[in-house]
C-alpha cells in the first residue's frame, strides 16, 4: 500500500503566490497532485521554475488576468479536458479535468474547479445578476459532475473533484453562520445544491469525513481586518471523492500558514493523504 498526497489551492494569482512562498511550500509538503484555482496568468508568464518536478495542465481561459485552473502532477496525464460542455462558461477557465495513472495507485480522474462567487441580491440588480449566473453555473456543472463521475467509474477510475466551490455547506463550515444566511456562499439554495452532490455512493466530502464534529477547518479568510487572527473563516475549498478513494483518506485538513505575514493567498491549501 502506498500514500498519495493530494492538495487543492486557490492561489489568487500564481505569480504573487510564488513570491509569497508557494514554491517552498510545494517542495516541503511534496504533494503528488495539486489542483490550482485563480492562477490568473498567461501561459507564457507562468513561473514554471517553481515546480520543476511536476507536469502542469492549465486552462487560462479567455479573460486576461482572471480565473484560470490547473493541475500539477508528478506524472504526465493520459488525457486533459477543459470545461464541462457549457457555451456560457467554458471559455472562462473555471474547470479542468485530467486522467492520471500513478505507478503505485489506482487510475484517477481529477478535476480542478473555480466556481463563481456570486452576489447578494439585496445589494441591487448587478449583484442579483451575479447570483443568477452563479446558480446557472451550478445547475450545469452539477449535471456534468454526475456524467463525469459515472464515466470515470465505467473506465475503472476513481474520481476526485478539487477546488474552490465558493459555498460553505453547513453551519460548521464558517465562523459566523447566522450573520451570513443571506450572503452568497451560504444561501439555502447553494447549500442544498452542494448537499445533493454528496452521498455514500456518489461523492464524499473527504475533509468533513475526517473531521465530522469540528467547526472548520476553514480554508479562506478575507485579507481585511482581524479575520485571520481571529480565525473568522470559511471552509469553501473541498476534496469531493468517489467512495473507494475517500475510504482511503488517512489524514487531511488545511495547511494554515503560521502567521498573517506568511500567507500565500487569501486561501490556504487543503491537503489529504490517501492510502491506496
Image: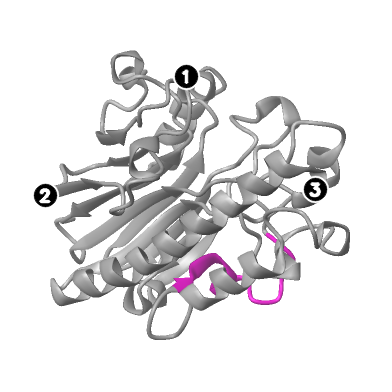
Q: Is residue 215 above or below residue 257?
A: below
Q: Position of residue 199 (x, y in %)?
A: 47, 82
Q: How far apart are marks 3 and 2 (CA)?
A: 40 Å
Q: Position of residue 68 (x, y in %)?
A: 41, 33
- The residue carrying mark 2 is 78
Q: Does residue 238 appear in this view?
A: no
* Residues at marks 3 and 1 touching, judged by CB atoms closer than 8 Å: no
Q: How crowded is mark 1: few (under 14 residues within 10 Å), some or many (20 or more)?
A: some
Q: Is residue 273 above or below residue 156?
A: above
Q: How crowded is mark 2: few (under 14 residues within 10 Å), some or many (20 or more)?
A: few
Q: Of residues 104 and 113, which is closer to you in this image?
A: 113
Which secondary structure, mark 2? loop
Q: Is residue 249 above or below residue 115?
A: below
Give the quadrant of the C terminus.
bottom left
3 or 1: mark nearer the eye: 1
At a point 52% along the width and 60% down the height, the residue shown is 252
Give the quadrant of the N terminus.
bottom left
Region of the chain picked out in magenta, as a range: 204-216
| Residue 231: mark in rendering | 3
Task: Check residue 6 for magenta coloring.
Answer: no
At a point 44% along the width and 65% down the height, the residue shown is 240
Residue sitting at the far front: 125
Dot 3 or dot 2: first in sequence order is 2
Seen in the image, is 1 located left or right of residue 218? left
Q: Position of residue 227 (x, y in %)?
A: 82, 41
- The residue carrying mark 1 is 15
Q: How crowded is mark 3: few (under 14 residues within 10 Å), some or many (20 or more)?
A: some
At a point 73% along the width and 33% down the height, the residue shown is 259
Seen in the image, is 49 located left or right of residue 37? left
- How many callouts does the rendering have? 3
At a point 45% along the width and 69% down the height, the residue shown is 250
Amino acid at each position: 500500500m502506498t500514500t498519495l498526497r493530494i492538495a487543492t489551492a486557490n492561489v489568487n494569482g500564481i505569480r504573487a503566490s510564488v513570491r509569497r512562498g508557494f514554491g517552498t511550500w510545494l517542495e516541503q509538503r511534496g504533494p503528488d497532485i495539486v489542483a490550482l484555482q485563480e492562477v490568473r496568468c498567461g501561459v507564457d508568464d507562468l513561473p514554471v521554475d517553481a515546480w520543476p518536478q511536476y507536469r502542469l495542465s492549465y486552462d487560462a481561459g479567455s479573460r486576461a488576468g482572471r480565473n484560470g485552473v490547473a493541475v500539477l502532477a508528478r506524472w504526465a496525464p493520459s488525457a486533459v479536458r477543459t470545461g464541462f460542455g457549457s457555451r456560457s462558461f467554458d471559455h472562462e477557465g473555471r474547470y479542468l479535468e485530467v486522467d492520471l495513472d500513478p505507478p503505485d495507485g489506482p487510475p484517477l480522474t481529477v478535476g480542478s474547479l473555480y466556481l463563481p462567487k456570486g452576489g447578494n441580491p439585496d445589494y441591487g440588480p448587478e449583484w442579483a445578476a451575479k447570483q443568477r449566473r452563479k446558480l446557472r453555473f451550478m445547475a450545469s456543472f452539477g449535471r456534468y459532475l454526475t456524467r463525469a463521475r459515472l464515466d470515470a467509474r465505467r473506465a475503472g477510475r476513481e474520481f476526485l473533484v478539487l477546488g474552490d466551490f465558493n459555498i460553505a455547506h453547513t453551519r460548521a463550515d464558517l465562523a459566523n453562520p447566522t450573520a451570513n444566511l443571506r450572503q452568497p456562499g451560504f444561501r439555502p439554495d447553494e447549500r442544498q445544491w452542494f448537499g445533493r452532490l454528496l452521498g455514500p455512493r456518489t461523492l464524499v466530502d473527504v475533509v468533513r469525513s475526517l473531521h465530522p464534529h469540528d467547526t472548520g477547518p476553514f480554508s479562506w479568510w478575507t485579507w481585511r481586518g482581524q479575520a485571520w487572527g481571529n480565525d473568522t473563516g470559511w471552509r469553501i475549498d473541498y476534496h469531493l471523492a468517489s467512495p473507494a478513494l475517500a475510504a482511503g483518506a488517512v489524514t487531511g485538513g488545511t495547511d494554515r500558514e503560521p502567521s498573517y505575514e506568511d500567507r500565500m493567498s487569501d486561501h490556504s491549501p487543503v491537503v489529504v493523504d490517501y492510502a491506496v
